[in-house]
Image (tube, rainbow, N blue to C red):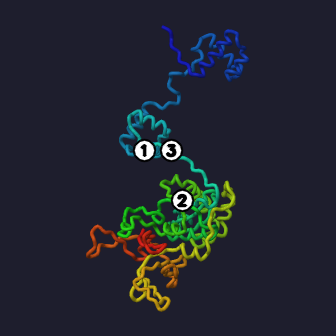
């Protein structure tokens, strides 16, 4: 019975070359180049092939255990340790514990192979990555702006964490504005929008995630929303609507990968520079960002867009002050006052001592804290600045006589985030909440 010889693909190719050398079709010197070995090694291989045939080209240790192979005793010990003490550990964690607690330094892949051969499955099965397509940049600045908040310990582990809100142009990667806030909130996004509008103008579209300051994540419908047949947006959503800015929602972190990567670059560079400058307070950091860091950062990382020019729409300072604000719809009381929570705004008489009692009016709180009251597009009242407070959305308990199916929202300015009512009598009516 003939002995069976198993050769690798490389060894088969060597046999074909050496066979031609044996028959005289090739010189050994020419075969040396084809075999990719030195001349002395080619002589050894040729002599072994002539003496033993194909078996002479097979690797000498084929079929034998590796000299550095770990023994079966160690394998059984590892499997016993996993069964007795480490059954809740994943593969990597188990390998770390073997080295730290048991003094056994074994490669992760070796341990993983032993466990799988013994029928021990992984602690957690990983889902295969989803297919994602790269989105090309917009061609011109101003066509799309991405913004996001990045919570982090920006001023060191000893200081409270805060959020960096930043906006970047999609076409060029230019940072259009950035500011630190104690947390990611509607007030911060309105201030960031005001910063972008002041420096560059109003973009055509904004790409954003589903943070509650930007997007309605709840499933609640107020009674007013049910009547209108539409859910009202957040304060930021209302402002973007009034500015005719298209909002595009990202449903994964990967979808807004460019702004996410920019946040990572900020964390890599900004923390070190803040520490170098000795900056540990938000107000001081915001001034330094505006005056020093952003221009230098853009000079290093911004790209030239494919098309020259800008799609940003210019906006006057007066329009910017008016529209980028919190807004609420309210009713003037019989004593010609508007009450929002603990705030009371007196409404002076109109032309010919006209009274505005029981009229629906639009009340705006601007980013400097000042209040204005509007009726039919005319300002009819104002109030001195009060501290800006982040609006919250709460439900009002059912009142006697309410339909049990109706749902209501408490209309208090510091507890409510009103939004436009498309059916309202104001072009920018803000009845509803978020």
Task: Please tell me whether mark 1 sits on a helix, a strand or a loop.
Answer: loop
Instruction: Specify which label sits upstream in the sequence, 2 or 3.
Output: 3
Q: In the drawing, does residue 117 fall left or right of residue 364?
A: left
User: Who's the residue at 39% across and 87% down the image?
Assistant: 334
Tag 3–tag 1 contact (CB < 8 Å) = no
Q: Look at mark 2 in the image and give the residue it sits on.
A: 207
Tell me whether the residue at label 2 lies in contact with that at label 3, contact meaning CB atoms closer than 8 angstroms: no
- Residue located at (50% from left, 44% from top): 131
Mark 2–mark 3 Cα distance, whole angstroms, equals: 21 Å
Horizontally, residue 255 falls left or right of residue 43, namely: left
| Foreground tag (1 vs 2) | 2
Which of the 4 quarters of the picture holds residue 194?
bottom right
Q: Distance between the residues labelled 3 and 1?
A: 27 Å
- Indicate the quadrant where residue 260 lies: bottom right
**Residue 340 seen:** no
Instruction: Judge the density around disc 3: few (<14), some (14-19), many (≥20) Cα neighbours within 10 Å.
Output: few
Kind of element beneath mark 2: strand
Q: Label 1 to label 2, Cα distance in Å?
A: 38 Å
Which circle's residue, 3 or 1, is located before the other in the chain? 1
Q: Is residue 429 above or below residue 65?
A: below
Whole-percent x and y of residue 177?
A: 60, 66
Q: Earlier in the sequence, mark 1 or mark 2?
A: 1
The circle on residue 131 is 3
Residue at figure coordinates x 51%, y 54% from the top left: 253
Question: Which sits in the foreground, 306 or 103?
Answer: 306
- Residue at image x 42%, y 32%? 73
Q: Residue furthest top?
A: 1
Q: In this view, does 78 lie to the left or right of 207?
A: left
Q: Label 1, on which residue?
A: 90
């Amino acid at each position: 019975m003939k002995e069976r010889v198993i050769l690798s693909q490389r060894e088969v190719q060597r046999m074909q070359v050496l066979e031609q050398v044996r028959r005289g079709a090739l010189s050994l010197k020419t075969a040396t180049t084809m075999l990719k070995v030195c001349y002395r090694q080619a002589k050894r291989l040729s002599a072994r092939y002539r003496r033993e045939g194909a078996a002479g080209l097979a690797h000498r240790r084929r079929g034998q255990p590796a000299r550095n192979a770990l023994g079966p005793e160690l394998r059984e010990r590892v499997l016993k340790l996993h069964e007795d003490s480490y059954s809740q550990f994943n593969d990597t964690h188990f390998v770390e514990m073997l080295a730290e607690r048991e003094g056994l330094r074994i490669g992760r892949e070796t341990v993983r192979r032993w466990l799988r051969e013994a029928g021990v499955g992984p602690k957690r099965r990983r889902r295969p990555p989803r297919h994602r397509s790269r989105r090309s940049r917009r061609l011109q600045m101003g066509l799309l702006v991405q913004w996001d908040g990045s919570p982090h310990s920006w001023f060191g582990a000893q200081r409270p964490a805060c959020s960096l809100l930043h906006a970047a142009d999609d076409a060029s990667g230019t940072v259009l504005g950035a500011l630190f806030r104690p947390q990611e909130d509607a007030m911060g996004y309105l201030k960031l929008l005001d910063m972008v509008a002041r420096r560059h103008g109003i973009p055509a579209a904004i790409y954003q995630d589903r943070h509650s300051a930007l997007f309605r994540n709840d499933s609640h419908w107020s009674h007013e929303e049910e009547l209108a047949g539409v859910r009202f947006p957040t304060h930021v959503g209302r402002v973007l609507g009034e500015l005719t800015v298209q909002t595009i929602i990202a449903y994964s972190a990967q979808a807004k990968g460019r702004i996410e990567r920019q946040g990572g670059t900020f964390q890599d560079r900004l923390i070190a520079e803040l520490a170098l400058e000795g900056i540990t307070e938000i107000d001081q950091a915001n001034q330094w960002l505006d005056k020093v860091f952003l221009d230098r950062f853009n000079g290093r990382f911004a790209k030239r867009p494919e098309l020259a020019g800008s799609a940003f729409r210019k906006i006057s300072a007066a329009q910017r002050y008016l529209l980028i604000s919190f807004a609420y719809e309210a009713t003037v009381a019989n004593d010609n006052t508007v009450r929002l929570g603990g705030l009371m705004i007196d409404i002076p008489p109109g032309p010919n001592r006209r009274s505005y009692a029981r009229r629906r009016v639009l009340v705006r709180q601007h980013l400097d804290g000042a209040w204005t009251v509007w009726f039919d597009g005319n300002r009819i009242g104002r109030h001195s600045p009060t501290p800006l407070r982040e609006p919250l959305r709460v439900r009002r308990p059912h009142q006697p006589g309410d339909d049990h199916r109706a749902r209501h929202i408490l209309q208090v300015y510091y507890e409510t985030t009103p939004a436009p009512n498309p059916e309202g009598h104001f072009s920018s009516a803000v009845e509803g909440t978020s």
